[in-house]
């Protein structure tokens, strides 16, 4: 079990840092489906596990020069308050309502991202201020469910014109702050399974540390052409999983 958790952590860490986060659902899947933790314990352990890997990956992204702080700071303006509000009201929102709202939003974002990948290359019609909306949605996902919130952030940044390496770097920067705030609230609501969390963390730290350096060796346009449709498909899958 220990080797399996480390290996899965490595895969998740490498994958989500290349996709700018959005791996909360993967961590939760492992913690609930394999480690058999309770939902509350899985939410707290997921944020605890993801934070160090996210920090290491963010530093690696920063070294590549792809981080766009102006976009990240705009995301945080609405994402941080939304995280706090979501954490405070998480017990009041019916699970079914939350799942359907998030599923619809993720599905729409996923379809738009796929269309941008395979459709014509004309410039998106999204306005710059929509970055605040994506930030708010991300914060609610972290606060209410203990997810990382990277899905809407990445989709928003890509639709606003950033290439994949830039969006991944900027998203990871914003998600660090959200994870810290979310962990602070969920820590009091669910028990962290330290053994399982540390095993996953070891693997994810290694994966998150090396992947940005690997991506930096490739043409950003080619990386975007490959990973952007993958991101869109993953958003659609995540949407379906929320309601199935």
Image (spheres, helix red, strand yellow):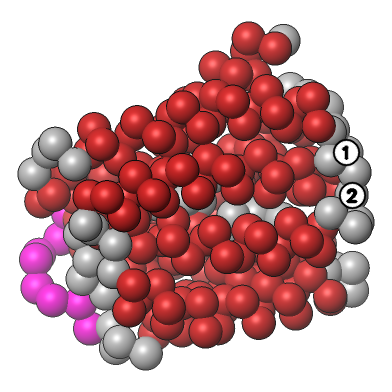
Residue closer to the observer: 176 or 151: 176
Q: Are marks 2 and 1 in contact (CB under 8 Å)?
A: yes
Q: Position of residue 177 (x, y in %)?
A: 57, 65
- Upstream in sequence: badge 2 or badge 1: 1
- The answer to whether residue 49 is above or below residue 240 is above
Magenta stretch mostly in which secondary structure?
Answer: loop
Q: Is residue 244 visible?
A: no
Identify the residue at image location x=31%, y=54%: 62
Identify the residue at image location x=33%, y=34%: 211
Q: Position of residue 130 (x, y in %)?
A: 39, 85
Numbered range of the magenta stretch: 118-125
- The answer to whether residue 28 is above or below residue 165 is above
Q: Is residue 237 shown left or right of residue 229?
A: right
Q: Is residue 123 shown left or right of residue 89?
A: left
Identify the residue at image location x=73%, y=76%: 84
Q: Quadrant of residue 38?
A: top right
Residue closer to the observer: 12 or 97: 12
Q: Dot 2: few (<14), some (14–19), or many (≥20) neighbours within 10 Å? A: some
Determine which of the numbered discs, if any, sits on residue 190 in the image: 2
Distance CA(mark 2)–CA(mark 1): 9 Å
Residue 231 is inside the magenta segment: no
Q: Is residue 59 visible?
A: yes
């Amino acid at each position: 079990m220990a080797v399996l958790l480390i290996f899965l952590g490595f895969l998740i860490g490498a994958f989500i840092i290349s996709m700018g986060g959005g791996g909360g659902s993967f961590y939760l899947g492992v913690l609930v489906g394999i480690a058999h933790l309770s939902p509350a314990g899985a939410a707290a352990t997921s944020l605890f596990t993801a934070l160090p890997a996210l920090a290491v990956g963010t530093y690696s992204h920063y070294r590549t020069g792809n981080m766009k702080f102006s976009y990240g700071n705009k995301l945080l303006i609405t994402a941080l308050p939304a995280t706090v509000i979501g954490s405070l009201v998480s017990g009041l929102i019916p699970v079914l309502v939350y799942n359907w709202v998030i599923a619809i939003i993720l599905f729409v974002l996923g379809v738009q991202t796929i269309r941008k990948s395979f459709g014509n290359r004309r410039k998106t019609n999204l306005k710059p201020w929509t970055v605040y909306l994506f930030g708010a949605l991300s914060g609610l996902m972290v606060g209410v469910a203990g997810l990382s919130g990277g899905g809407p952030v990445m989709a928003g940044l890509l639709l606003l014109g950033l290439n994949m390496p830039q969006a991944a770097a900027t998203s990871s920067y914003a998600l660090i702050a959200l994870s810290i705030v979310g962990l602070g609230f969920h820590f009091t609501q669910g028990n962290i399974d330290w053994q399982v969390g540390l095993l996953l963390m070891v693997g994810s730290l290694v994966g998150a540390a090396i992947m940005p350096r690997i991506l930096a060796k490739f043409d950003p346009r080619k990386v975007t052409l490959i990973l952007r449709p993958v991101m869109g498909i993953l958003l659609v899958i995540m949407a379906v999983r929320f309601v199935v």
